[in-house]
Amino acid sequence: MKKKESFNMKKSFQIFKRDIGRLSKNIVALIVVIGVCIIPSLYAWFNIAANKDPYGNTANIKIAVANNDAGTENDMLGNLDVGGQIVDTLKENDSLGWVFVSEDKAISGVKSGEYYAAIVIPDNFSESMVSFLSGKIEQPEFDYYLNEKKNAIAPKITDTGANTIQQQVNTEFVSAAAGTVADILNGSVSEIGTKLDDVQNDILTKISTVSDNLKEYEKALDSFNKTVDSSNKLIEKSKKSMATVKSNANSGVNSIKNGTDSLTLVRNDIADFANDLGTGISKAQNSLAKVNTKSGINLGKISSKTESIHGQFQEMITSVESIIDKNSEMLITLKEINKKYPSDSLTNLINELDSQNSKYKTILQKLRTGSNSINDATTTSVKAVESISKIIEKNTKDIQSSKGTVENGIMTGLNTSLDTFSSIQGTLSGILKGVGPATDNVVTLMDQLENSLDSAKKALSSTGSSIKKVQERLDKANVDISVVKTSKIYEKLKDMTNLDSDKVASFMSSPVKLKTETFYSVENYGTAMTPFYTNLAIWVGGIVLIAIFKMEVDKSEKIKNFTPTQAYFGRWMLFILVGFVQALIICLGDIFILKIKCQHPVLFVVAGLVAAFVYVNLIYALSLTFKHIGKAVSVILVILQIPGSAGTYPIEMTPGFFQAIHPLLPFTYGINAMREAIAGTYGHYYVKNLVILLIYVPIALFIGLVLRRLLLNLNSLFDKKLEQTGLMICEEEGITRERVRLLTTVKILAGEKQFRDEINKKVEQFEICYPKLIKGGFFAIVIIPIVFLILMFSITSKMVFLVLWIVSIILIALYLICVEFIHENLLNKQKMAEMTGDELIEQLKKRGRKNSKEGDED
């Protein structure tokens, strides 16, 4: 049975005292320890000093400037050379290293790395600056060339320089423009009152002119409307008269047809002609007289109506011409007003009046065409009446003459007269038949005329309304000007004759001033970076400790027996002591050597000591428990904490992976605590961060005291395998646990053949699987990381796969170690199974004596 004893720190203090004694007696070792204490501080100090005020040395960053600006002449601004002004300003500016060269040299210098950046001002820069004055705005721009390969931070600084030039040009331009405007305003204020009076008088004159034209226009419009109304009535009557004329013309055609029938009868009864000659000739003369009378009456009516319509047409033509003239006069007046005092609404009104005037001219052309057509119809009717009268009169005379001839027996003459009469009847019939279509054309023309007159009436009414609106707007403008002239603002404007153009320019170039109030001010960039570099140096100090000092405790004559726990704390005290010394040197050097501005120096040092206590505990526990893998984990942790602790950039600017692990990292709280001490505390934040940081100590103790016990033999095997290479540094004095349990030893002593056979069978089975397990592990340690590496470059979550890649390597390494441990343990059991009884008894006695001396707590 194992003897259990209560744990005490006596052996641990003995180990610590022995370690201190060894170091103090060895000068070389003491020098190495001093170096171990100082080297981490150098890491912090050099970085803090180098970053103390990097932006104060930007004058050494060379930026080439090439000015090709040709300048420009401007009536308002005079001779302008913006490029030259920029160069003059930059020559007095020492914030960056401005170098003034040609364009070719500037660009080639950026490519070669001689200059970090180059700015080229084009030849039309000044001209573009004032392009807005000509109405054709051209955005001025200069060319900016940048060499991003030369340095990571320099482009940000040179960008700031380029933006500064851009802002400076904008400011100078606004200032110059504002000053010029102020000067012009000073010279123009005295003229404003006079010009305002002139404008008002001009508007009053135009209002009077438009008002007079509007009155005449309204009279012409009323006259035209009356003419249109009477014309519409006359057109309706004329259309009815056209129907009567058409009917009478058709009746005349029938009468002529009857006359033709009578002539036919005369021809048929020629034999009886002699007897009835007097009677027939009298009838023919009567028929011709009737035809002449009816034709004259009907054609006379047509002529009378067409003459009346023609007269109405002339009246309407005169009215429309008058309206067009009045409209044109008003357009000229309105265009003059709009030219002097432009207005979108007035422009729209002028366009509307122009459009209506075009419509009136179209109507006028139609009226003239209709008037000419009616006039032609009247002329045709008069000529037809005269022609018919002449023909009938001539034929009546011929018939009368023929009567005497017939009576003398000249039948041939009678027949000729009858033929002539028949021809006259055909001509007359043709004339009367043409009257119908002519009347239809006149009716169609009258319908078109009626529609045109209605359109003209509506258009003229709309024009009248538009002109009334113009008059109302002009009246309103006159009132507004009168109000302006009597206002207080106008009176103050007249008094503005002493504007300070310099003050106006200064205000316009920078109308808003930024008032900054800083909380928890930090002296410089180096001071702001001190918490990060100090915590990093303390962690690096812990890694240096595990690289220099042995972690396993060796036995000596005075200290022959001790437990793993006693050994853990014995060497732990040395690590913690040296860690404290490192932290003190680093923090005190920050304050007294680098002279950082620290609001609470004592709190800053306390934060450094707490950080050292936590970091050394974690590094010591990981390295002692997991050996080389633990050391690798310590390095991986510092790699993750550099970007993930928000020591340099705000954590919100980092990828999502680092934002996720940010609250889990010790650096987060160590840095925050030091920031509180340097810039000033807020509430209980300082204590809160230190308390959270101390939570990692129990975690480290659990790893070092609990997990380590389970891995003692595994670590011993790991060190043994590394020692076999002759290349790797390993611990030779590692503590181990008994690999074979007491029950196993008793079973072997009892001579249980079956138990021995079981051990041999297990060994044989494992030996068969052992090569495959080893090969599988090595295959996995190659393939799985490659898979994660591929995924890291093809998927957006690169940091997740990078961590998985590293974790996979560690887990596979642990797997191989465990396989090797199981293999070694089985071989030990097999070896014991082959031992004799005496050998086993002697081994049990040795174990008993060892347990009694060590007081093993297992």
Image: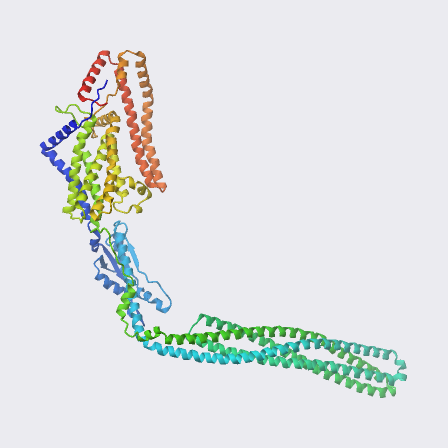
Work out whether residue 155 or residue 797 is closer to the camera in this orientation and state it. Answer: 797
Of residues 816 and 624, the one drawn nearer to the viewer in this rendering: 624
Q: In which quarter of the image is residue 704?
A: top left
Q: Where is residue 597 in the image (x, y as percent from the top left)?
A: 18, 49
Q: Where is residue 773 in the image (x, y as percent from the top left)?
A: 33, 25
Specify the color scheme: rainbow
Rendered residue at 72%/81% (across/down): 299
Question: In the image, residue 336 lies at what x, y percent?
Answer: 44, 77
**In the rendered image, is residue 758 in sight?**
yes
Q: Which residue is drawn at 81% across and 79% down?
A: 259
Residue 434 visible? The answer is: no
Does residue 332 appear to the left or right of 17 in the view shown?
right
- Picture layout, residue 139 above or below residue 218: above
Quarter of the image for residue 84 reads bottom left
- Please state the horizontal and vertical placement of residue 169, each as a whole percent of the image: 28, 63
Looking at the image, the residue that sits furthest to the front is 683
Q: How many marks?
A: 0
Task: Point out the image quarter for the C terminus.
Answer: top left
- 703 lies above or below 824: below
Which residue occupies the foreground of this view, 331 or 416?
331
The image quadrant of residue 551 is: top left
Q: Nearer the viewer, residue 237 or 488?
A: 488
- Residue under the image location 35 percent in, 41 percent down: 797
Identify the residue at image location x=22%, y=15%: 844
Quadrant location, the N terminus? top left
